[in-house]
Image (spheres, rainbow, N blue to C red):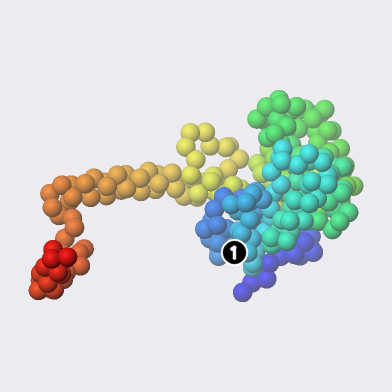
Amino acid sequence: MNKALTILDLQALKGGRKITFVQVAREEEAIAASQAGVDMIGTAFVPERAGFARAVPETHFQYGLPWGTHADATEALRAAMAAMQAGAQSIYCGLSPHVIEVLAREGVPVICHVGLVPPKATWTGGFRAVGKSKAQAVTVLQQVRDFENAGAYAVEMEVIPAPLATAITQRTSMLTISLGSGGDCDVQYLFSADLLGENRGHFPRHAKAYRNFAAERDRLQAERVAAYQEYIADVQNGGFPAKANIVEMDEAILHDALSTADKG
């Protein structure tokens, strides 16, 4: 069994080989990613996913604190500690440097978030790249410094210009995680739903689909409908249940049982 990468291991890889990171929504995705050799696996720390980390002990596992569920640093710290006890080796937290500092001070390895932060996208003009203007680039650089000073060990950089991401990677001790922010970051990050081609309609420019699970799911759904239709037809024409689907009984025993019951 391979050994899961620790924070120390990950930090030692900065500036060396690229680290792979995927976000999963199902336990079977986590298991498949681990078997494939992905370095880091993440998911939201919600009850239905709280057991994912235990399923892949040989892979670094990150639980994310869902944005909007923790009103202050104490609540976030309590949730982070619960996530660590559930098997996480690191925690994603999209809150402020003040909250990050509280978690880091207690030894929680924290991933912070800059650039396009979906719950805060209204501040940066909606779902679009962040950092193309001088003002936005300066803001992103300052946010990175603030998070680094707060004690975060890694920063997710979502859809910021690749040259800016490269400059940040060269200027911070944190691991930089690219979600649509170019190839010079320390870590490349994709959502399994995009990687596996599960989405229909809009597909993020920064993502890449390696399979077409949406088409496969459509095929399986059509097969479900066909199977139900065949079952209905079998019931109506006497094809189900067949002899192989029923339990037989000795006719003499049945006759005796019925006679006894009728006399009673």
**Crowding at mark 1 (Cα within 10 Å: few <14, some 14-19, many 20+):** some
Location of residue 76 with respect to 56 vertically, above or below: above
Residue that extends furthest to the front in the rendered view of this protein = 264
Location of residue 120 with respect to 41 vertically, above or below: above
Residue beneath disc 1 = 55
Q: Amino acid at mark 1?
A: Ala
Between 161 and 75, the one nearer to me in the picture: 75
Between 10 and 51, the one nearer to me in the picture: 51
- The image shows residue 12 at horizontal and vertical percentages of 79, 63
- The image shows residue 135 at horizontal and vertical percentages of 82, 27
Instruction: Residue at 46%, 50% (x, y): give it.
Output: 211
Q: Is residue 120 left or right of residue 240?
A: right
Instruction: Residue at 78%, 39% (x, y): give it.
Output: 71
Location of residue 87 with respect to 221 vertically, above or below: below
Q: Quadrant of the N terminus?
A: bottom right
Q: Does residue 206 appear in this view?
A: yes
Q: Is residue 71 left or right of residue 238?
A: right
- The image shows residue 174 at horizontal and vertical percentages of 81, 52
Q: Does residue 182 appear in this view?
A: no
Q: Is residue 202 left or right of residue 4?
A: left
Between 118 and 238, the one nearer to me in the picture: 238
Q: Quadrant of the C terminus?
A: bottom left
- The image shows residue 260 at horizontal and vertical percentages of 14, 69
Between 14 and 126, the one nearer to me in the picture: 126
| Tag count | 1
Instruction: Residue at 52%, 58% (x, y): give it.
Output: 28
Instruction: Residue at 20%, 67% (x, y): give it.
Output: 247
Element under disc 1 = helix
Location of residue 28 with respect to 93 vertically, above or below: below
